[in-house]
Image (cartoon, rainbow, N blue to C red):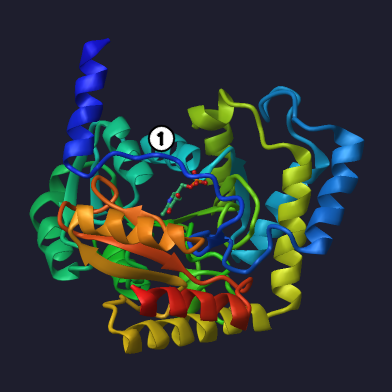
Amino acid sequence: MQWIEEELERLRFESLYRQRSLREGLLDFCSNDYLAMKDHPEVIEESVKVLRNYGLGSGASALVSGYTKHHRDLEDKLSEFKLTPCCVLFGSGYLANLGTIPVLVGEDDLVLSDQLNHASIIDACRLSKSKVLVYRHGDYQHLEELLKTFRNYHRRCLIVTDTVFSMDGDIADIRTLKRYAEEFDCMLYLDEAHATGVLGPSGKGGLEEFGESWEDYIVVMGTLSKAIGSYGAFVCGSKVLCDYLVNKARSLIFSTSLPPAVCAGAKKAIEIIQRESWRVRKLKEKSELIYSRLSTIGLEVLFHHTPILPIMVYEEAKALDLRDRLLKQGILIQAIRYPTVPIGMARLRLTTTLRYTDDYLERLFKAFEKL
Ligand SMILES: Cc1ncc(COP(=O)(O)O)c(C=O)c1O
Protein backbone atom coordinates (compact mmCIF):
# COMPACT_ATOMS: atom_id res chain seq x y z
CA MET A 1 0.00 0.00 0.00
CA GLN A 2 1.86 2.95 -1.40
CA TRP A 3 -0.18 5.54 0.50
CA ILE A 4 1.03 4.21 3.85
CA GLU A 5 4.66 4.59 2.71
CA GLU A 6 3.87 8.17 1.67
CA GLU A 7 2.20 9.00 4.97
CA LEU A 8 5.17 7.62 6.93
CA GLU A 9 7.53 9.60 4.70
CA ARG A 10 5.58 12.77 5.45
CA LEU A 11 5.87 12.07 9.20
CA ARG A 12 9.64 11.57 8.82
CA PHE A 13 9.96 14.82 6.87
CA GLU A 14 8.08 16.75 9.58
CA SER A 15 10.12 15.15 12.41
CA LEU A 16 6.90 13.55 13.67
CA TYR A 17 7.81 9.92 12.92
CA ARG A 18 7.69 7.62 15.95
CA GLN A 19 9.48 4.44 16.84
CA ARG A 20 9.46 2.41 20.01
CA SER A 21 12.87 2.09 21.64
CA LEU A 22 13.76 -0.90 23.77
CA ARG A 23 14.21 0.22 27.36
CA GLU A 24 16.64 -2.49 28.40
CA GLY A 25 20.08 -1.26 29.35
CA LEU A 26 18.98 2.39 29.57
CA LEU A 27 18.38 4.65 32.56
CA ASP A 28 14.66 5.35 32.31
CA PHE A 29 13.81 8.97 33.12
CA CYS A 30 10.32 9.09 31.67
CA SER A 31 8.26 6.45 33.42
CA ASN A 32 5.07 7.36 35.29
CA ASP A 33 5.85 4.93 38.10
CA TYR A 34 6.29 7.97 40.35
CA LEU A 35 6.24 6.19 43.72
CA ALA A 36 8.37 3.22 42.58
CA MET A 37 5.49 0.84 43.21
CA LYS A 38 5.71 -1.39 40.15
CA ASP A 39 8.45 -3.60 41.59
CA HIS A 40 7.99 -3.02 45.31
CA PRO A 41 8.71 -6.42 46.93
CA GLU A 42 5.35 -6.53 48.74
CA VAL A 43 3.47 -5.70 45.54
CA ILE A 44 5.26 -8.44 43.63
CA GLU A 45 4.76 -10.98 46.41
CA GLU A 46 1.03 -10.28 46.59
CA SER A 47 0.60 -10.42 42.79
CA VAL A 48 2.54 -13.69 42.49
CA LYS A 49 0.45 -15.26 45.24
CA VAL A 50 -2.77 -14.39 43.39
CA LEU A 51 -1.23 -15.32 40.03
CA ARG A 52 -0.59 -18.84 41.33
CA ASN A 53 -4.20 -19.19 42.50
CA TYR A 54 -6.05 -17.51 39.65
CA GLY A 55 -3.73 -17.82 36.63
CA LEU A 56 -2.79 -15.09 34.20
CA GLY A 57 -5.99 -13.73 32.71
CA SER A 58 -9.42 -13.05 34.19
CA GLY A 59 -11.04 -15.13 31.44
CA ALA A 60 -14.07 -12.94 30.74
CA SER A 61 -15.62 -9.50 31.15
CA ALA A 62 -16.73 -8.39 34.63
CA LEU A 63 -20.39 -9.08 33.80
CA VAL A 64 -19.71 -12.64 32.65
CA SER A 65 -17.27 -14.39 35.00
CA GLY A 66 -14.34 -11.97 35.13
CA TYR A 67 -15.27 -10.36 38.45
CA THR A 68 -13.41 -11.86 41.41
CA LYS A 69 -12.92 -11.03 45.06
CA HIS A 70 -9.71 -9.23 44.00
CA HIS A 71 -11.63 -6.89 41.68
CA ARG A 72 -14.19 -6.16 44.39
CA ASP A 73 -11.53 -5.65 47.09
CA LEU A 74 -9.61 -3.24 44.87
CA GLU A 75 -12.78 -1.26 44.11
CA ASP A 76 -13.47 -1.03 47.85
CA LYS A 77 -9.89 0.08 48.56
CA LEU A 78 -10.08 2.71 45.81
CA SER A 79 -13.34 4.19 47.06
CA GLU A 80 -11.87 4.35 50.57
CA PHE A 81 -8.68 6.00 49.22
CA LYS A 82 -10.51 8.50 46.98
CA LEU A 83 -13.13 9.24 49.67
CA THR A 84 -16.08 8.41 47.41
CA PRO A 85 -18.98 6.01 48.04
CA CYS A 86 -18.24 3.73 45.12
CA CYS A 87 -15.76 2.76 42.45
CA VAL A 88 -15.76 0.70 39.22
CA LEU A 89 -12.72 -0.79 37.46
CA PHE A 90 -11.91 -0.45 33.77
CA GLY A 91 -9.26 -2.11 31.58
CA SER A 92 -7.24 1.11 31.14
CA GLY A 93 -7.51 4.88 31.50
CA TYR A 94 -8.26 5.20 27.82
CA LEU A 95 -11.11 2.70 28.15
CA ALA A 96 -12.42 4.38 31.31
CA ASN A 97 -12.76 7.75 29.60
CA LEU A 98 -14.12 6.25 26.41
CA GLY A 99 -16.70 4.21 28.30
CA THR A 100 -17.80 6.80 30.85
CA ILE A 101 -18.03 10.23 29.19
CA PRO A 102 -20.38 9.13 26.36
CA VAL A 103 -22.87 7.70 28.86
CA LEU A 104 -22.88 10.87 30.97
CA VAL A 105 -23.63 13.18 28.05
CA GLY A 106 -25.20 12.75 24.62
CA GLU A 107 -26.62 14.64 21.66
CA ASP A 108 -28.66 17.16 23.66
CA ASP A 109 -25.84 17.98 26.05
CA LEU A 110 -22.90 20.31 26.47
CA VAL A 111 -19.26 19.48 27.31
CA LEU A 112 -16.73 22.09 28.40
CA SER A 113 -13.25 20.64 27.97
CA ASP A 114 -9.83 22.13 28.80
CA GLN A 115 -7.69 22.71 25.71
CA LEU A 116 -4.88 20.47 27.03
CA ASN A 117 -6.99 17.51 28.13
CA HIS A 118 -5.67 14.03 27.40
CA ALA A 119 -6.37 12.45 24.00
CA SER A 120 -8.66 9.85 25.58
CA ILE A 121 -10.92 12.65 26.88
CA ILE A 122 -10.95 14.31 23.46
CA ASP A 123 -11.89 11.03 21.79
CA ALA A 124 -14.54 10.28 24.44
CA CYS A 125 -16.11 13.73 23.96
CA ARG A 126 -16.29 13.13 20.19
CA LEU A 127 -17.86 9.74 20.75
CA SER A 128 -20.53 11.28 23.01
CA LYS A 129 -21.95 13.36 20.10
CA SER A 130 -22.47 16.26 22.54
CA LYS A 131 -21.72 19.85 21.71
CA VAL A 132 -18.07 20.13 22.81
CA LEU A 133 -16.63 23.55 23.60
CA VAL A 134 -12.94 23.79 24.37
CA TYR A 135 -11.90 26.48 26.83
CA ARG A 136 -8.37 27.92 26.73
CA HIS A 137 -6.03 25.98 28.98
CA GLY A 138 -6.63 26.90 32.63
CA ASP A 139 -8.58 30.02 31.58
CA TYR A 140 -11.64 29.81 33.81
CA GLN A 141 -12.90 33.22 32.73
CA HIS A 142 -13.20 31.75 29.25
CA LEU A 143 -15.01 28.76 30.75
CA GLU A 144 -17.44 31.11 32.50
CA GLU A 145 -18.14 33.03 29.27
CA LEU A 146 -18.91 29.79 27.45
CA LEU A 147 -21.17 28.60 30.27
CA LYS A 148 -23.06 31.89 30.33
CA THR A 149 -23.59 31.80 26.57
CA PHE A 150 -24.37 28.13 25.97
CA ARG A 151 -25.44 26.36 29.15
CA ASN A 152 -29.14 27.24 28.98
CA TYR A 153 -29.57 25.70 25.54
CA HIS A 154 -28.58 22.22 26.64
CA ARG A 155 -30.06 19.52 28.81
CA ARG A 156 -27.06 18.18 30.78
CA CYS A 157 -23.63 19.77 31.08
CA LEU A 158 -20.23 18.25 31.86
CA ILE A 159 -17.05 20.14 32.73
CA VAL A 160 -14.07 17.88 32.11
CA THR A 161 -10.41 18.34 32.98
CA ASP A 162 -7.17 16.53 33.67
CA THR A 163 -6.41 17.27 37.34
CA VAL A 164 -2.67 17.16 36.61
CA PHE A 165 -2.01 17.85 32.92
CA SER A 166 -0.03 14.95 31.57
CA MET A 167 2.42 16.81 29.33
CA ASP A 168 2.83 20.09 31.26
CA GLY A 169 2.50 18.90 34.85
CA ASP A 170 0.34 21.82 35.94
CA ILE A 171 -2.73 21.47 38.13
CA ALA A 172 -6.36 22.37 37.37
CA ASP A 173 -7.99 24.69 39.90
CA ILE A 174 -10.46 22.21 41.36
CA ARG A 175 -12.03 24.72 43.75
CA THR A 176 -12.93 27.12 40.93
CA LEU A 177 -14.20 24.30 38.74
CA LYS A 178 -16.42 23.05 41.57
CA ARG A 179 -17.85 26.54 41.95
CA TYR A 180 -18.73 26.75 38.24
CA ALA A 181 -20.15 23.24 38.20
CA GLU A 182 -22.46 24.17 41.08
CA GLU A 183 -23.42 27.60 39.71
CA PHE A 184 -24.27 26.28 36.22
CA ASP A 185 -25.67 22.89 37.26
CA CYS A 186 -22.98 20.82 35.54
CA MET A 187 -21.31 17.52 36.35
CA LEU A 188 -17.56 17.78 37.00
CA TYR A 189 -15.31 15.05 35.56
CA LEU A 190 -11.77 14.89 36.95
CA ASP A 191 -9.18 12.74 35.19
CA GLU A 192 -6.80 11.99 38.05
CA ALA A 193 -4.40 9.75 36.09
CA HIS A 194 -1.40 11.82 37.22
CA ALA A 195 -2.94 13.21 40.42
CA THR A 196 -3.57 9.88 42.17
CA GLY A 197 -0.68 9.14 44.52
CA VAL A 198 0.76 12.58 43.76
CA LEU A 199 -1.51 15.44 44.91
CA GLY A 200 -2.57 16.17 48.46
CA PRO A 201 -0.55 15.32 51.58
CA SER A 202 -1.52 11.64 51.31
CA GLY A 203 -1.74 11.36 47.52
CA LYS A 204 -5.52 11.11 47.35
CA GLY A 205 -5.65 13.56 44.47
CA GLY A 206 -7.06 16.94 43.46
CA LEU A 207 -9.85 17.24 46.02
CA GLU A 208 -7.41 16.61 48.87
CA GLU A 209 -4.90 19.06 47.37
CA PHE A 210 -7.53 21.83 47.41
CA GLY A 211 -9.06 20.82 50.76
CA GLU A 212 -12.36 20.11 49.00
CA SER A 213 -14.73 17.24 49.53
CA TRP A 214 -16.35 14.94 46.98
CA GLU A 215 -19.91 15.84 46.01
CA ASP A 216 -22.56 13.86 44.21
CA TYR A 217 -22.06 15.67 40.87
CA ILE A 218 -18.30 14.86 40.75
CA VAL A 219 -16.96 11.91 38.77
CA VAL A 220 -13.38 10.99 39.68
CA MET A 221 -11.54 8.92 37.11
CA GLY A 222 -8.00 7.69 37.69
CA THR A 223 -5.51 5.09 36.50
CA LEU A 224 -3.66 2.29 38.23
CA SER A 225 -0.88 2.63 35.68
CA LYS A 226 0.99 5.65 37.04
CA ALA A 227 1.78 6.18 40.74
CA ILE A 228 0.04 2.92 41.68
CA GLY A 229 2.55 1.10 39.46
CA SER A 230 0.10 -1.39 37.97
CA TYR A 231 -2.28 -1.41 35.00
CA GLY A 232 -5.94 -0.51 34.57
CA ALA A 233 -8.18 2.32 35.70
CA PHE A 234 -11.19 3.26 37.77
CA VAL A 235 -14.11 5.64 37.97
CA CYS A 236 -15.26 6.69 41.44
CA GLY A 237 -18.46 8.46 42.36
CA SER A 238 -21.90 7.82 43.78
CA LYS A 239 -23.35 4.30 44.15
CA VAL A 240 -25.93 5.07 41.52
CA LEU A 241 -23.19 6.16 39.09
CA CYS A 242 -21.35 2.86 39.59
CA ASP A 243 -24.54 0.91 39.01
CA TYR A 244 -25.19 2.96 35.86
CA LEU A 245 -21.67 2.39 34.49
CA VAL A 246 -21.90 -1.37 35.02
CA ASN A 247 -25.10 -1.29 32.97
CA LYS A 248 -24.11 1.22 30.30
CA ALA A 249 -20.36 1.72 29.83
CA ARG A 250 -19.53 -0.26 26.71
CA SER A 251 -15.78 -0.49 27.39
CA LEU A 252 -16.59 -2.19 30.70
CA ILE A 253 -19.35 -4.43 29.38
CA PHE A 254 -17.66 -5.57 26.18
CA SER A 255 -14.06 -5.94 27.32
CA THR A 256 -12.29 -8.54 29.43
CA SER A 257 -11.71 -7.44 33.03
CA LEU A 258 -8.28 -6.87 34.55
CA PRO A 259 -6.25 -9.93 35.60
CA PRO A 260 -6.90 -10.68 39.31
CA ALA A 261 -3.15 -10.60 40.10
CA VAL A 262 -2.95 -7.05 38.70
CA CYS A 263 -5.82 -6.00 40.98
CA ALA A 264 -4.20 -7.61 44.03
CA GLY A 265 -0.86 -5.89 43.30
CA ALA A 266 -2.59 -2.52 42.83
CA LYS A 267 -4.46 -2.90 46.12
CA LYS A 268 -1.21 -3.69 47.92
CA ALA A 269 0.43 -0.62 46.35
CA ILE A 270 -2.37 1.63 47.65
CA GLU A 271 -1.97 0.12 51.12
CA ILE A 272 1.76 0.92 51.02
CA ILE A 273 1.06 4.50 49.87
CA GLN A 274 -1.40 4.88 52.76
CA ARG A 275 1.03 3.36 55.26
CA GLU A 276 4.10 5.29 54.07
CA SER A 277 2.90 8.84 53.51
CA TRP A 278 6.55 10.00 53.33
CA ARG A 279 6.60 8.72 49.74
CA VAL A 280 4.30 11.48 48.47
CA ARG A 281 6.32 14.12 50.34
CA LYS A 282 9.65 12.75 49.11
CA LEU A 283 8.42 12.75 45.53
CA LYS A 284 7.76 16.49 45.76
CA GLU A 285 11.19 17.14 47.30
CA LYS A 286 12.94 15.09 44.62
CA SER A 287 11.09 16.92 41.83
CA GLU A 288 12.11 20.25 43.33
CA LEU A 289 15.75 19.15 43.47
CA ILE A 290 15.81 17.90 39.87
CA TYR A 291 14.10 21.06 38.69
CA SER A 292 16.60 23.35 40.39
CA ARG A 293 19.66 21.40 39.17
CA LEU A 294 18.42 21.35 35.56
CA SER A 295 17.55 25.05 35.72
CA THR A 296 21.08 25.79 36.97
CA ILE A 297 22.46 23.94 33.94
CA GLY A 298 20.45 26.41 31.84
CA LEU A 299 17.52 24.27 30.70
CA GLU A 300 14.01 25.68 30.51
CA VAL A 301 12.02 23.34 32.70
CA LEU A 302 8.33 23.71 33.57
CA PHE A 303 7.72 23.00 37.24
CA HIS A 304 4.33 23.07 38.95
CA HIS A 305 5.16 20.99 42.03
CA THR A 306 4.29 17.69 40.35
CA PRO A 307 6.68 14.96 39.12
CA ILE A 308 6.15 15.92 35.46
CA LEU A 309 9.07 18.15 34.43
CA PRO A 310 8.90 19.07 30.73
CA ILE A 311 12.21 20.32 29.36
CA MET A 312 11.08 22.75 26.68
CA VAL A 313 12.79 22.45 23.30
CA TYR A 314 9.99 23.77 21.01
CA GLU A 315 11.37 22.58 17.64
CA GLU A 316 10.46 18.97 16.84
CA ALA A 317 13.75 18.14 15.06
CA LYS A 318 15.77 19.61 17.92
CA ALA A 319 13.85 17.56 20.48
CA LEU A 320 14.61 14.38 18.53
CA ASP A 321 18.26 15.29 18.26
CA LEU A 322 18.51 15.92 22.00
CA ARG A 323 16.73 12.64 22.79
CA ASP A 324 19.10 10.71 20.50
CA ARG A 325 22.19 12.31 22.02
CA LEU A 326 20.96 11.35 25.50
CA LEU A 327 20.27 7.81 24.28
CA LYS A 328 23.91 7.55 23.22
CA GLN A 329 24.80 8.23 26.86
CA GLY A 330 22.40 5.49 28.01
CA ILE A 331 19.64 7.86 29.12
CA LEU A 332 16.04 7.52 28.00
CA ILE A 333 13.86 10.65 27.99
CA GLN A 334 11.24 10.60 25.25
CA ALA A 335 10.74 13.54 22.91
CA ILE A 336 7.08 14.58 23.05
CA ARG A 337 5.79 16.11 19.83
CA TYR A 338 2.60 16.80 17.91
CA PRO A 339 -0.12 15.55 18.18
CA THR A 340 0.57 14.90 21.89
CA VAL A 341 1.45 18.61 22.27
CA PRO A 342 0.82 21.48 19.81
CA ILE A 343 3.22 21.98 16.86
CA GLY A 344 6.26 24.02 17.93
CA MET A 345 5.88 22.97 21.59
CA ALA A 346 8.11 19.87 21.51
CA ARG A 347 9.77 18.87 24.74
CA LEU A 348 11.61 16.14 26.57
CA ARG A 349 9.19 14.91 29.23
CA LEU A 350 11.31 14.10 32.24
CA THR A 351 9.51 12.59 35.21
CA THR A 352 10.57 12.17 38.81
CA THR A 353 10.30 8.79 40.47
CA LEU A 354 11.43 7.62 43.90
CA ARG A 355 13.56 5.08 42.08
CA TYR A 356 16.30 7.60 41.29
CA THR A 357 19.34 7.27 43.51
CA ASP A 358 21.87 10.10 43.86
CA ASP A 359 24.21 8.26 41.45
CA TYR A 360 21.45 7.83 38.92
CA LEU A 361 20.65 11.55 39.07
CA GLU A 362 24.31 12.59 38.81
CA ARG A 363 24.52 10.65 35.53
CA LEU A 364 21.51 12.60 34.28
CA PHE A 365 22.93 15.99 35.26
CA LYS A 366 26.37 15.14 33.79
CA ALA A 367 24.75 14.03 30.53
CA PHE A 368 22.94 17.36 30.23
CA GLU A 369 26.05 19.33 31.15
CA LYS A 370 27.93 17.49 28.38
CA LEU A 371 25.29 18.45 25.84
C1 LIG B 1 -4.59 12.26 31.77
C2 LIG B 1 -4.60 10.87 31.27
N1 LIG B 1 -5.77 10.23 31.12
C3 LIG B 1 -5.83 8.97 30.68
C4 LIG B 1 -4.69 8.27 30.34
C5 LIG B 1 -4.81 6.87 29.81
O1 LIG B 1 -4.48 5.96 30.80
P1 LIG B 1 -3.97 4.47 30.42
O2 LIG B 1 -2.54 4.60 30.08
O3 LIG B 1 -4.24 3.68 31.64
O4 LIG B 1 -4.80 4.05 29.25
C6 LIG B 1 -3.46 8.88 30.52
C7 LIG B 1 -2.20 8.14 30.29
O5 LIG B 1 -1.62 7.92 29.39
C8 LIG B 1 -3.40 10.21 30.95
O6 LIG B 1 -2.23 10.84 31.06
Q: Quadrant of residue 83?
A: bottom right
263 horizontally vs 305: left or right: right
Q: What count of labels does the image hold?
A: 1
Of residues 104 and 206, the one nearer the viewer is 206
Q: Would you say residue 50 is visible in this rendering?
A: yes
Q: Residues within 10 Å of mark 1 (few under 14, many from 20)?
A: some
The vertical placement of 127 against 115, above or below, is: above
Q: Measured from the top left, where is residue 69 in percent x and y?
A: 82, 42
The C terminus: image quadrant: bottom left
* Residue at 91% in and 38% down: 52
* Residue at 64% in and 57% down: 229
In the rendered image, which residue does mark 1 sit on?
103
* Residue at 53% in and 81% down: 362
* Residue at 20% in and 43% down: 132
Residue type, numbered disc 1: Val
Q: Measured from the top left, where is residue 257 in percent x and y?
A: 66, 32
The vertical placement of 34 against 294, above or below, is: above
Q: Measured from the top left, where is residue 72 in percent x and y?
A: 75, 45
Q: Would you say residue 115 is visible in this rendering?
A: no
Query: Residue placed farthest to the top in the image?
Result: 1
Q: Measured from the top left, where is residue 133 in percent x and y?
A: 17, 48
Q: Quadrant of residue 186?
A: bottom left
Mark 1 residue element: helix
The vertical placement of 217 against 213, above or below, is: above
282 horizontally vs 72: left or right: left
The N terminus: image quadrant: top left
Of residues 131 and 310, the one nearer the viewer is 310
